[in-house]
Image (cartoon, rainbow, N blue to C red):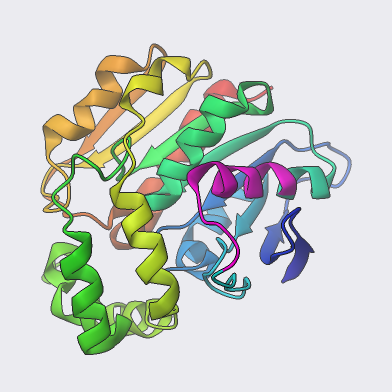
């Protein structure tokens, strides 16, 4: 795992996986994980994608092995988007493919809106244009986390995220252990920010080809909220995964990676 420092002095961690042919110059794909996660949550995507693309997985600020910023450091969506741009500047890359899961997808959409010349393609997994119109009650989430801890909160709400009859119980325990490492204090800042966001009016500014993969049994967001992307983005491929709750990127990682891989090959170069 490598690190770099952002322009506001926060140390962020990232992982690079590149199994492309050494005589080629691969395009770069940046993956952004969901809230209460880290780059490790996307481990199963790497084998499919890294053979054809240089895959970079960022730990969002306050998550994984990235630094938790102090209270004096402002937290805004433009700052989270800027982290991605400063990462690719650090890597010496002009343009990237960008894919995000849940909160990571909201950040990805903001990057594509604010920095269209840097984004070749955009992929959104399980995310509406923001949580403002969603069913998330940020206050209740934070109170629950304060009462039970991050792991306890996720354990209590696990059925909102996975169809427990269709996932390995050992995976669920790993998911709880891994996600439970996230700072509760940081989430008390991060979740309320996400709850204020709605990029609907800016979706038409997304100029690059976009893939949107959404579940139809999501208690966090309704299908109508997801369909805003289908209706507002001109070059979007909209795919519905039937019978799955929110965490499709964890529950069916191979399927998601295959979906993204096909999309990227169609738009490579």
Q: Nearer the viewer, residue 148 or 1?
A: 148
Quarter of the picture holding the C terminus: top right
Left/right placement of residue 241 relative to residue 19 reads left
Res. 145 image quadrant: bottom left
Vertical side of 50 occupied by 178: above or below: below
Q: Outermost residue toward the right? A: 23
Q: Residue at x 22, y 54 (%)?
A: 246
Q: Residue at x 57, y 28 (%)?
A: 114
The spot of residue 168 in percent (x, y) is 25, 76
Evaluate whether residue 111 shows in this view. Answer: yes
Q: Residue at x 46, y 34 (%)?
A: 109
- 76 in magenta: yes
Left/right placement of residue 44 relative to residue 30 reads left
The spot of residue 8 in percent (x, y) is 72, 57
- Range of magenta residues: 72-86
The spot of residue 224 in percent (x, y) is 13, 30
Q: Nearer the viewer, residue 17 or 95?
A: 95
Q: Outermost residue toward the top? A: 234
Looking at the magenta stretch, what is its main secondary structure?
A: helix
The spot of residue 72 in percent (x, y) is 59, 67
Res. 251 image quadrant: bottom left
Q: Nearer the viewer, residue 200 or 258?
A: 200
Vertical side of 212 occupied by 21: above or below: below
- 17 in magenta: no
Quarter of the picture holding the N terminus: bottom right
Evaluate whether residue 36 shows in this view. Answer: no
């Amino acid at each position: 795992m490598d690190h770099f420092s952002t322009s506001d002095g926060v140390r962020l961690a990232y992982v690079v996986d590149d199994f492309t042919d050494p005589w080629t110059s691969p395009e770069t794909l940046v993956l952004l994980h969901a809230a209460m996660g880290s780059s490790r949550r996307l481990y199963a995507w790497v084998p499919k994608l890294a053979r054809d693309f240089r895959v970079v997985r960022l730990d969002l600020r306050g998550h994984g092995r990235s630094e938790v910023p102090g209270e004096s450091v402002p937290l805004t969506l433009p700052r989270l988007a800027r982290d991605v741009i400063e990462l690719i500047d650090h890597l010496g890359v002009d343009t990237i493919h960008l894919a995000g899961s849940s909160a990571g997808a909201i950040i990805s959409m903001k990057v594509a809106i604010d920095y269209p010349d840097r984004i070749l393609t955009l992929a959104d997994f399980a995310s509406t244009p923001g949580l403002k119109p969603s069913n998330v009650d940020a206050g209740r989430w934070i109170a629950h986390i304060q009462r039970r801890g991050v792991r306890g909160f996720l354990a209590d709400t696990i059925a909102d995220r996975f169809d427990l009859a269709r996932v390995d119980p050992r995976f669920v325990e790993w998911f709880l252990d891994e996600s439970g490492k996230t700072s509760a204090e940081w989430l008390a800042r991060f979740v309320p920010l996400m709850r204020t966001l709605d990029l609907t009016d800016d979706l038409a500014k997304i100029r690059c080809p976009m893939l949107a993969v959404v579940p139809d049994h999501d208690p966090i967001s309704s299908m109508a909220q997801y369909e805003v992307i289908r209706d507002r983005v001109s070059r979007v491929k909209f795919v519905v995964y039937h019978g799955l709750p929110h965490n499709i990127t964890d529950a069916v990682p191979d399927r998601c990676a295959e979906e993204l891989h096909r999309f990227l090959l169609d738009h490579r170069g």
